[in-house]
Image: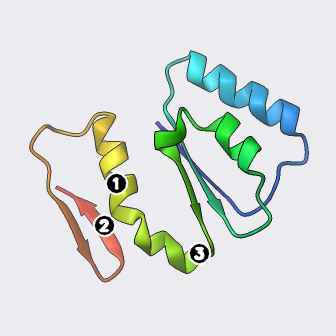
Amino acid sequence: MTVVITDGQSKYPSITKFQADRAKEEGVTMIVIGIGNYTDHDELHNMATSDNFLYEVNDYDDLLSIDLDIARQICKGGCATNITIEKKNNTIRIL
C-alpha cells in the first residue's frame, strides 16, 4: 500500500501515470491525497487505485478531517482483524 500526498501537478504526467499503473499491476493499492487548488483531478484519479482511494482537501489542515478514513483504508489492506483506531492530539494510533 502506498499513500501519495501532493499539492501540485507532476512535471511529467505521463511518467507519473505509467509508474502508478505499474505499481497497481504489481498489486500495490494506491491511496492518493490532493491538497489545494493546484492539483489536477485527472492526474490524481489516474494514480489512485479507484475513486474510493482518492481524496482531495483544500489545505494541509483539512487532512485532519480525513485522517481516520485514511487509517481505515490502510487497515483494509492488511491490519489485524480486531483493530482499534484511536485519535488523540492529531495523532492516529492503530491498535
Image position, residue 92 (x, y; %): 31, 67
Q: Is residue 60 left or right of residue 43?
A: left
The answer for how far apart the CA atoms under marks 2 and 3 are is 16 Å
The answer for how far apart the CA atoms under marks 1 and 2 are is 8 Å
Q: Is residue 87 above or below residue 45?
A: below
Q: Is residue 38 above or below residue 80?
A: below
Q: Which mark is residue 71?
A: 1
Mark sitting earlier along the chain (1/3): 3
Residue name at image x 25 percent, y 72 percent: 87
Residue at numbered disc 3:
60
SS type, badge 3:
helix
Tell me the kind of residue under disc 1. Ala
Q: Is residue 95 left or right of residue 52?
A: left
Residue name at image x 69 percent, y 35 percent: 46
SS type, badge 2:
strand
Mark sitting earlier along the chain (2/3): 3
Image position, residue 61 (x, y; %): 53, 80
Mark sitting earlier along the chain (1/2): 1
Residue at numbered disc 2:
92
In the picture, the quarter occupied by the C terminus is bottom left
Q: Residues within 10 Å of mark 3 (few under 14, many from 20)?
A: few
Q: Residues within 10 Å of mark 1 (few under 14, many from 20)?
A: some
Tell me the kind of residue under disc 3. Tyr
The answer for how far apart the CA atoms under marks 1 and 3 are is 17 Å
Image position, residue 86 (x, y; %): 20, 67
Front residue of 34/90: it is 34
Residue name at image x 61 percent, y 25 percent: 23
Color theme of the render: rainbow
Tell me the kind of residue under disc 2. Ile
The answer to whether marks 1 and 3 mark residues whose Cβ atoms lie closer than 8 Å is no
The answer to whether marks 1 and 2 mark residues whose Cβ atoms lie closer than 8 Å is yes
